[in-house]
């Protein structure tokens, strides 16, 4: 219960059944009716026995059977999408990430060639990312993909911008402008599909309560610009469920278990101004981090790992010469749903190899730092 809010007065007919030093009413039960309530989040990894609390409620109190399967979700989704779409065409924004990949594959199962994916290369992707996306979807899955090279547009609009929310406010509308322009070239398109997940909905906007908006997601804004019906087949799923869905759909392991990557890309991992030179430094360092984690088997043990290029320089010594170069932070976390996260305790020898390789191979970095902040109070991304 890290939100800072608390219940001071119980509703009429209820009694408190749980409390903490800071929350006098952490759980309630009605004195006569089968009604219960809790103040905390049982679904997050930080709650002890949270899964047991949910299981007790679902199976012992509500009498649920627990026989639902991901295959039944696929069958129901495919049937629902086919019925809704009919003979119309669907467009889907493809980023190469887990969410959009699973959404695209599920949609392709449902409507086949009626689906066209649009991949906007914003110049803010990881090393070799754009080529992998096209090779995987166009060549391997035979899904129609339109690639738009827009790096120059994004970088020109980001020139001189340092505030993270300003970056998002530039990247989001720019993406929407380019996507809409391409979408309007495709005939008979009536539906826009997106890989929106439930955490995206929670963190972007609250329509059911006074939750704070933590960050903005540009993929939630497309529907306002296109005169199309929205299809969000993953909207009520968490990331672990999406991965299970991806495996059930036959996506490659490497794709299904790929670490999450933010919509604004490396722009929010280059702290301060985004330039092609700084992006190149971060891409090299980030590739080394992921390479070492994959070599040692740690890539699949952490939820997300990446480099963050700081707007800080430090003095160093390389050979016999003094250097004054960039500082790079390594961020790695474990999580189940991205709503909460702990910093990953990667062995020192692996961290040492990562640091030595970055300093030795990446021109422009002479110091590597480790971020050991959990969420909350920090977010997973720095910006």
Image (cartoon, grey):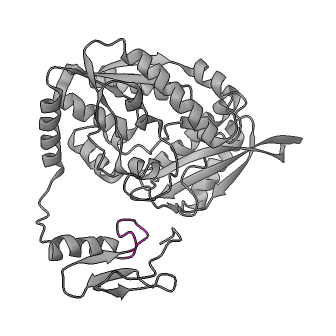
Q: Quadrant of residue 377?
A: bottom right
Question: Where's residue 40, x and y in %?
Answer: 40, 72
Question: Where's residue 54, x and y in %?
Answer: 27, 71
Q: Residue at x 44, y 78 (%)?
A: 7
In this rendering, the count of numbered labels is 0
Q: Nearer the viewer, residue 27 or 329?
A: 27
Residue at the extreme right of the image, as rendered? 321
In the rendered structure, does residue 41 fall within the stretch colored magenta? Answer: yes
The stretch in magenta equals 39-48
Residue at the extreme front of the image, as rendered? 12
Q: Residue at x 89, y 42 (%)?
A: 322
Q: Is residue 204 visible?
A: yes
Q: Relative to residue 224, is residue 215 depicted above or below?
A: below
Question: Where's residue 75, x and y in %?
Answer: 12, 41
In the rendered structure, does residue 129 fall within the stretch colored magenta? Answer: no
Q: Nearer the viewer, residue 229 or 144?
A: 229
Q: Residue at x 56, y 61 (%)?
A: 347
Q: Is residue 142 visible?
A: no
Q: Main secondary structure of the magenta part?
A: loop
């Amino acid at each position: 219960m890290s939100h800072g809010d608390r219940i001071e007065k119980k509703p009429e007919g209820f009694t408190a059944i749980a409390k903490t030093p800071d929350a006098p009413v952490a759980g309630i039960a009605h004195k006569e009716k089968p009604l219960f309530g809790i103040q905390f989040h049982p679904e997050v990894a930080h709650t002890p026995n949270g899964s047991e609390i949910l299981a007790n409620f679902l199976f012992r109190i509500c009498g649920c059977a627990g026989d639902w399967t991901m295959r039944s979700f696929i069958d129901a989704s495919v049937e629902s999408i086919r019925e809704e779409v009919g003979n119309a065409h669907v467009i889907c924004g493809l980023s190469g990430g887990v969410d959009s990949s699973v959404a695209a594959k599920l949609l392709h199962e449902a409507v086949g060639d009626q689906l066209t994916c649009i991949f906007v290369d914003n110049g803010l992707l990881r090393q070799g990312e754009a080529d992998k996306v096209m090779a995987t979807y166009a060549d391997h899955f035979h899904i129609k993909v339109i690639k738009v090279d827009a790096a120059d547009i994004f970088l020109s609009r980001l020139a001189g911008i340092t505030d993270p929310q300003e970056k998002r406010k530039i990247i989001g509308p720019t993406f929407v402008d380019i996507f809409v322009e391409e979408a309007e070239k495709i005939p008979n398109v009536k539906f826009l599909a997106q890989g929106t997940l439930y955490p995206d909905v929670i963190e972007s906007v609250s329509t059911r309560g006074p939750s704070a908006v933590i960050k903005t997601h540009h993929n939630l804004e497309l529907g306002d610009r296109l005169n199309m019906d929205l299809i969000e087949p993953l909207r009520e799923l968490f990331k672990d469920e999406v991965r299970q869905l991806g495996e059930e759909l036959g996506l490659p392991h490497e794709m299904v278990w790929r670490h999450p990557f933010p919509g604004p890309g490396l722009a929010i991992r280059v702290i301060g101004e985004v330039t092609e030179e700084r992006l190149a430094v971060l891409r090299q360092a980030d590739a080394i981090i992921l390479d070492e984690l994959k070599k040692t088997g740690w890539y699949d043990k952490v939820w997300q790992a990446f480099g963050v290029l700081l707007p800080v320089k430090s003095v160093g010594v390389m050979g016999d010469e003094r250097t004054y170069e960039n500082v790079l932070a390594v961020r790695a976390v474990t999580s189940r749903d991205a709503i909460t996260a702990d910093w990953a305790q990667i062995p020192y020898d692996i961290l040492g190899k990562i640091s030595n390789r970055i300093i030795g191979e990446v021109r422009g970095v002479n110091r590597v730092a480790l971020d050991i902040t959990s969420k909350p109070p920090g977010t997973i991304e720095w910006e």
